[in-house]
Amino acid sequence: MTTLLLASNGTVVDHHIVKIVNKPPEEIKVAYVTTASLDAGRLSNKNHRERLDGHIKNMTDQGLEVEEIDVNGKTQAELTKILADKNVVYVAGGDSFYLLKAVRDSGFAEVIKALVSQGVVYAGASAGAYLACPTMDMATWKRGEDYRAFGLDDLKALNLVPFLIVAHYIEELRDILAVGVMTSAYPVRILKDGQGLLVKDDQVEFIGEGDEVRLIG
C-alpha cells in the first residue's frame, strides 16, 4: 500500500505521523528533508531554522528517531543509502522551485518513488506536498517569480498523486486561486493551515481543522 500525508503546514504532519505509520513511536525512523528551507539567498535562515527545529522537537518528543537531510549536493547512491532504514520520508516546506531543482539534480525523485512503492510513508508540508503532485504549476499562482531563474525548464514533479494542492489558503487569495483552479489541467485541492490529505492507494481522506475549501463547483 502506498501512503502519503500531504499538508498545508508541518504541524499537521507532526500530529498525525505516528497514527499513520501504525508502529510504536520508537520503531519509526523519519528522514526529515529540509532542503526547501535552506536556500540562503531567498529565505530567512533564522526563522526557518527555528521552524524546522520546532517540528523536529515535536517528533522526537513523541519518541520518533529523526534524521535531518539536505538532498542538495547528494547523489542518488548516497540518498539510497541514507534512506534505506527509514519508514517515513518527510519533506518540509520552503521554496518550491529550489526544492524541485535539488530533487532533480540529486536523483531524490527516483529514490523516493521506489521507496513509496515499497511502503515507505511520504509526508510533505507546503512545498513538500507540492512535490508529490504531477506538477508544481500551482506554486506560480500566488507569486510572480520566474522558476526559470532556478535553472528549471518546467515544473513537472513526482506525480505520486493525480491532483494539485494549494497550501496556506486565506480568503484574500480566493479570486487569484480560482483562476488557477479553472485553468488547471488537474483537479486542485485547497488547504488551509491545519489541514491535510491522507492518501492510501487511490483513497483520499481530508483531515484537520474546519471544512475543505471549494472555490468552484
Image (spheres, rainbow, N blue to C red):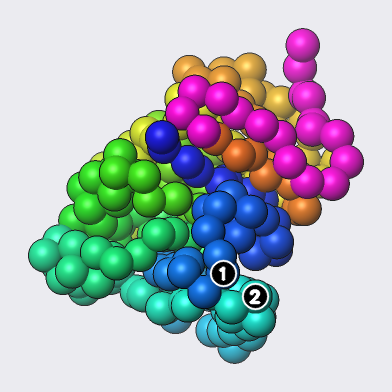
Q: Position of residue 126 (x, y in %)?
A: 58, 53
State left or right for residue 209 relative to residue 59. Answer: right
| Lower position in the chain sequence, tag 2 or tag 1 | 1
Residue 62's disc number: 2
> Is residue 15 toward the left or the right of residue 44 in the image?
right
**Which amino acid type is marked by label 2?**
Gln
* Quadrant that contains the N terminus: top left
The part of the chain drawn in magenta is 200-217
In this view of the protein, which residue sits in the foreground, 159 or 146? 159
26 horizontally vs 168: left or right: left
Labels 2 and 1 touching (C-beta < 8 A): yes
Residue at image position (66%, 81%) is 61
Percent across and percent down for residue 198 are 60, 39
Residue 197: x and y, percent? 63, 39
Q: Which residue is pictured at 43% across the width and 59% down the height?
A: 88
Decide if residue 32 is in sight here. Answer: no
The residue sitting at 84% across, 46% down in the picture is: 209
Residue 181 against residue 26 in the figure, above or below: above
